[in-house]
Image: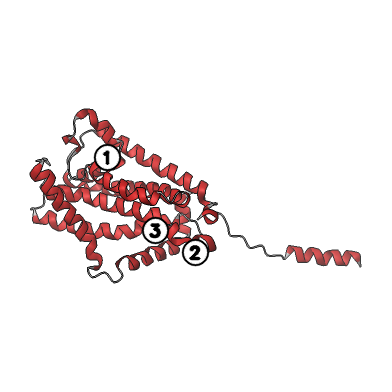
Amino acid sequence: MESERLDKTTARSESLLVLSAGRSSALLWKDLWRFRELLAFLAWRDVLLRYKQAAFGIGWALLRPVLTMLVFTLIFRRVVEVEASSVPYPLFALCGMLVWQFFSGCVADAAQSLVSNTSLVTKVFFPRLILPASTTLVNLLDFAVTLALFAGLWLFYGTPSLGPLWALPGVLLWMLGLALGVGFWLSSATVRYRDVKFLVPFGLQLGLYASPIGYPISALPEKFRFWAYLNPLSGLVEGFRWCFFGSSPADAHGVWLSLGVSVFLLLSGFVFFRKMEDSFADII
């Protein structure tokens, strides 16, 4: 009788179903692929919210780079008389704006991605890095619109000689990796220190002029170029211009330095995000 009761207890314990929320993968791409449908849904939701009830709609993605290009043309081309080699200056400036608009949009959106989705973070399990990663998809739409404008301006100026476009996919991956790395850092920091949301717009304002968007690095004195390339956007922008125009960077070693800084930001940002991830729901 006793043995029969033990057998029933054992059977019940063996049939017990344990539900677990799971753990995030140690690899970024695994989580992005596993939760790809959620990633796409969040990106589409943000696109709808961004342009909802906007009179110009997605036209705002064109208006910002065009106005900035005109300001740069007035300041750097007319006043400071910056030369952009054989490339028409508006085309030169817009190429830099391709990178800057994507990067600044990702940084601004990623910094607020966790705190603006508090209900999701505190009530539903999913890899939290999906939230800052989804901002890159949203800003890729703006990037595609600006790229179409760039192509139209290219044709307007008589299609300057092409550079090595075969390298463009690698430069695009660099751009995505840099945006993700900085986004991981800022989204994690914003959860703990809300002051970050005030620092990000100020930092982006400075970054626009600290990066070679409206001027080439070759316009800087040689002794300052090393410090300029510590800004990862410097090498990235030169990489884009090299792909489209074939213009050689001011310093090839400097481009590798910018690439190294970008890889460091991506890896360290991912590690820092993972370290903070378990505490997001408690302190947000």
Q: Quadrant of residue 20?
A: bottom right
Q: CA distance from mark 2 to mark 3?
A: 17 Å
Q: Which residue is mark 1?
A: 235
Q: Position of residue 135 (x, y in %)?
A: 37, 57
Residue under the point 19% across and 60% down: 63
Residue under the point 52% across and 53% down: 283
- Nearest-to-viewer mark from 2 and 3: 2
**Chain-order first, disc 2 or disc 3:** 2
Q: Which residue is mark 2?
A: 119
Q: Secondary structure at mark 3?
A: helix
Task: Judge by depth and name the residue closer to the eye, 94 or 246.
Answer: 94
Say what amino acid the circle numbered 2 marks.
Ser
Q: Is residue 29 above or below residue 13?
A: above
| 10 Å crowding of disc 2: few (<14), some (14-19), many (20+) | few
Q: Position of residue 102 (x, y in %)?
A: 29, 53
Say what amino acid the circle numbered 1 marks.
Gly
Residue under the point 27% across and 31% down: 226
Task: Judge by depth and name the residue closer to the eye, 242 or 282.
Answer: 282
Q: Secondary structure at mark 1?
A: helix
| 10 Å crowding of disc 3: few (<14), some (14-19), many (20+) | many
Q: CA distance from mark 2 to mark 1?
A: 39 Å
Q: Position of residue 64 (x, y in %)?
A: 21, 57
Say the numbered circle drawn on residue 134.
Answer: 3
**Chain-order first, disc 2 or disc 1:** 2
Name of the residue lying farthest toward the top: 223
Q: Position of residue 149 (x, y in %)?
A: 18, 58
- Nearest-to-viewer mark from 2 and 1: 2
Task: Locate residue 192 relative to residue 108 in the image: left or right.
Answer: right
